[in-house]
Structures are given as structure tokens and as C-alpha cells.
Amino acid sequence: MTREQDSADAAANPALLIWSRLIQGAAAVVIVLSLTLLLSPRLGEAIFNLVYFHQLSMPVEVPSLAHGYIWFANGIIGAVMAGWMICIILLARGPFLEGRLHAWNTIAIHWPVGF
């Protein structure tokens, strides 16, 4: 999408442009956090624990052998979430800006609630 198209869409409906940018920004934050789970498992786990449990360490004692499996599973989840958010960004930049209802329904229904 070019800047001319972007400004033309904004002139047609500025509210859609604002919401599109908010959706893209939120998706970008999710991508960063998801890639952190994938690329830096310890940091990703600490961020996850801080967000959900308000502490940097896990709330329960986990055997050291389980950490590798947990980090592997978190990496898969991070990769899937990053790919999912790329699709959300593409929807927000294209069909959503054009005012197509199916784009909004797809974004609203498929947004990750727990993240």
C-alpha cells in the first residue's frame, strides 16, 4: 500500500485509519513479545511471569529438567503468535482500511485474548 492510497483512505474515513494504526501498533507489541519467547526463552519467561503473576520468577517450583521443554513450547507459541500478528497487520493495512466488514470480524474474532 502506498502513501497516496493511505492518505486517500484516511480522507475517506479517518476513523478507520486511526483504528488501523492502533491495531497495527498492538500487533507489533505482540510480535515483539512473541519473538522474545522464541529467541530469548529466559527473558520471555520472565516477562510472561511479570505480566501474569507480578513477579519475575515462576510462581511454583519447576524441576530443572522441565525448563527445556517449557522453553521449547514457549518458542513454538511465540512463533505462531508472531505469524498470526503479521496476518492481523496485513488485514489492518488492506481490507480493514477499505471498510470491509469481514476484515473487522476476522480481527475481532481472532485477536489473542490472553496476551
Image (cartoon, helix red, strand yellow):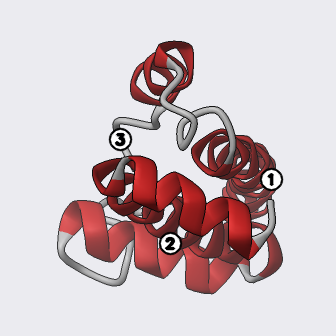
Q: Secondary structure at mark 1?
A: helix
Indicate the amino acid at tag 2.
Val
The CA span between labels 3 and 1 is: 16 Å
Q: Secondary structure at mark 2?
A: helix
- The image shows residue 34 at horizontal and vertical percentages of 64, 63
Crowd class of label 3 (few under 14; some 14 to 19; many from 20; radius 10 Å) = few
Q: Which residue is mark 1?
A: 79
Does residue 1 appear in this view?
Answer: yes
Give the number of the disc on residue 29.
Answer: 2
- The image shows residue 8 at horizontal and vertical percentages of 57, 59
> Which sits earlier in the primary sequence, circle 1 or circle 2?
2
Does residue 23 appear in this view?
Answer: no
Q: Which residue is mark 3?
A: 114
Indicate the amino acid at tag 3.
Gly
The answer to whether 101 appears left or right of 103 in the picture is left
Residue at 66 percent of width and 39 percent of height = 91
Figure quadrant of the N terminus: bottom right
Q: Residue furthest toward the left?
A: 54
Between 31 and 106, the one lying in front of the other is 106
Crowd class of label 1 (few under 14; some 14 to 19; many from 20; radius 10 Å) = some
Between 86 and 75, the one lying in front of the other is 86
Crowd class of label 2 (few under 14; some 14 to 19; many from 20; radius 10 Å) = few
